[in-house]
Amino acid sequence: MNLEILNQQIDGLKDELIKAVQDCIQFKSVKDMDHASPGAPFGPGIRDCLEWTLSLGESLGFDVKNIDGYAGQIEMGAGELLGILGHLDVVPEGDGWSVPPYSGAVMNGRIYGRGAIDDKGPTLAALFAMKAIKDAKIPLNKKVRLILGTDEESGWEDMDYYKQKEDIPVIGFAPDAEFPLIHAEKGILHLEFSKQFNPLPHLREIQGGERANVVPDSCRVVLNGFTREDLSQKLSHYTFPEGVTGKLETSSGEDGLILMFKGVGAHGSLPQKGKNAVLHALQFLASLDLSQEEAELIHWLNNRPGKGYFGEGFNVAFADEPSGKLSLNLGIMDLSARHIRFVIDVRYPVTIKEDQILKPVAACGQEIGLQMLTLSHQKAHHVPKDSPLVKSLLKAYSDVTGLEAYAFAIGGGTYAKVLPQGVAFGPLLPGEPEVIHCPDEYMAIDSLILACKVYAQAILNLAGA
């Protein structure tokens, strides 16, 4: 009976939820440390988005709290905590959009914009699920706390700060991945390599990627010592795969000729889903007549981070039964005539230890004198499939959708790792395209409403009186 009542409540909230998602997308909540300040530790865009969302929660009748701009929380009920962890920060928009990336435009039954599905839409779906339960006056025996993160796409400093200030729920879920349910998340390492060298004769610049956890969709190369005719001929005879282009810019830079390579962006946990513009630029550069030092560097890059998607180049192609294969993404490349710095994103299986990755990868870097630094590390996370949490959530999913319910593992890292017993739960339905971190990111309105209904039933299964 509660399922039917909740579904009716949510159908009645549909327009309000759509408008809320549109409004939330219009905040450019990208991390901006150049303009950080007290109360805005990750910049004004994220602060404004957090304050707006808390104000929305308050207007819906909930208790809200701003944790010094690092995070927020929206609560209902009393007793033991049930956590729902979403985030309001987004990755930079990148290129290739057919609609303004912060418009929240509605077309063809979809809401478009950066953050639509990662993670503003799902977070607000959880909020309106709470609203439906409140309006239906269904009693709860737990305090339901929606935690609003602000640094999920970067270093998770928000959660480090939050844990110092507030109690962390033991159980809960993160509406920030896929349905039916993710019970295991791989460990995540962001590793930086760097080296200084004497000025290179030809390679003046290779620039691509903004975040380690995004497959770069563009790469800028500046070359010296080649004629425009040389490079035009090389490009015309070079075969790029479908979806990848290389173009000689009409204007030249002060230091040489400029080439722009375009690929296909994707989430860093799924490098095989994209076409890495940096890697394709490096493969093209291998066809040029470079100096010995340059050729050796390009060869190493193509045969270490550039070989395969699963760590083959670094001799770390591990896999296990709970979580599958390791993945590796070259997410940031910054090369000048005197210096190279690049960052790789490694997602390793839940049964593999950190040192099993770090030692062989560092050894490969030392082959050409690269220094390795661990920028960040999220340990692997695993909740057994037969746990009460997993069973309760899967029942909510199957009852609402009528679809088969099962638990699986991913390479993506979600806030589920913050909780001792946390899992990732939706919103992407089986068969839906993955548009997270891509141009024209969107969330289908039907999927938004369905996710809201699933989350409402999930809250009742875990916290209903």
Image (tube, helix red, strand yellow):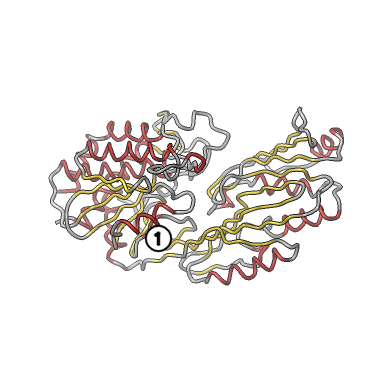
Q: Is residue 61 found left or right of 378 in the rendered image?
A: left
Front-most of 82 and 324?
82
Residue 328 image-quadrant placement: bottom right
- Residue closer to the observer: 441 or 151: 151
Residue 44 at x, y = what percent?
Answer: 43, 37
Number of numbered labels in the structure image: 1
Q: Is residue 10 left or right of residue 274?
A: left
Q: Is residue 354 above or below residue 259?
A: below
Q: Name the residue under label 1.
A: 417
Q: SS of the residue at dot 1?
A: helix
What is the quadrant of residue 246 in the picture?
top right
Question: Is 105 or 242 nearer to us in this picture?
Answer: 105
The C terminus: image quadrant: bottom left
Give the x, y percent position of residue 255: 79, 37
Considering only vertical position in the picture, is 182 above or below 356?
A: above
Where is residue 356? Give x, y as percent. 58, 72
The three-letter code of the residue at mark 1 reads Lys
The image shows residue 278 at horizontal and vertical percentages of 67, 46
Q: Say whether residue 61 is left or right of residue 275.
A: left
Q: Residue at image x 27%, y 65%?
A: 388
